[in-house]
Amino acid sequence: MYEISNDFDLTPLVGNRIISIDRSINMLSFIFDKKNSITCDGPIDIKELKGSFLINSSEKWSSIDPIYSVLEKEITSWKVDSPKSFRMFLKDGTAITFFDNSKQYESFHFSPNGWII
């Protein structure tokens, strides 16, 4: 909804491991080992060496079972694709892309920083 600016900085996530993925009716939360989290309700694309899959929440979450393959993996870098997405790259080469596609509601919330997009 608010769009992602070019200067959006995800450096605090580098070195974090994804230790939990929680799902609710319309949100998905990634919990990191250094007390950070990303809660989102926009689409997420995960590209692994063996293939890719899209998890979309426009109405309901599709099956999120494949997403658990990113658990315990460390974030090594990130990239902002302003104004509608950002990516996190994991140590094994996996890329997780979060999309801002909402015209009415926030697509992401970052804790503890309190950033809302």
Image: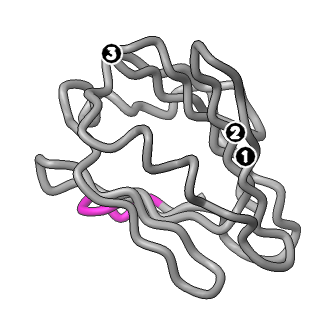
The kind of residue tagged 2 is Asp
Residue at the spot x=30%, y=62% of the render?
Answer: 111
Give the CA distance from mark 2 to mark 3: 17 Å
The kind of residue tagged 3 is Lys
Whether residue 70 is in magenta: the answer is: no
Q: Position of residue 21 (x, y in %)?
A: 38, 61
Q: Position of residue 39 (x, y in %)?
A: 47, 65
Q: Are marks 3 and 1 in contact (CB under 8 Å)?
A: no
Q: Are marks 2 and 1 in contact (CB under 8 Å)?
A: yes
In the image: residue 89, left or right of residue 104: left
Q: Which residues are magenta?
A: 111-115
Q: Quadrant of the C terminus?
A: bottom right
The kind of residue tagged 1 is Phe
Chief secondary structure of the magenta portion: loop
Q: Earlier in the sequence, mark 2 or mark 3?
A: 2
Residue 40's place in the image compared with 34, above or below, is: below
Q: Earlier in the sequence, mark 2 or mark 1?
A: 2
Q: Earlier in the sequence, mark 3 or mark 1?
A: 3
Give the CA distance from mark 3 to mark 1: 21 Å
**Residue placed most toward the observer, 53 or 10:** 53
Judging by the rendered image, the residue that carries numbered circle 2 is 45
Looking at the image, the residue that sits furthest to the bottom is 25
Judging by the rendered image, the residue that carries numbered circle 3 is 91
In the image: residue 44, left or right of residue 96: right
Q: Are marks 2 and 3 in contact (CB under 8 Å)?
A: no
In the image: residue 43, left or right of residue 36: right
Judging by the rendered image, the residue that carries numbered circle 1 is 99
Q: Secondary structure at mark 1?
A: strand
Residue at the spot x=50%, y=34% of the render?
Answer: 8
Which numbered disc, 3 or 1, marks the residue closer to the eye? 3
Q: Residues within 10 Å of mark 3 (few under 14, many from 20)?
A: few
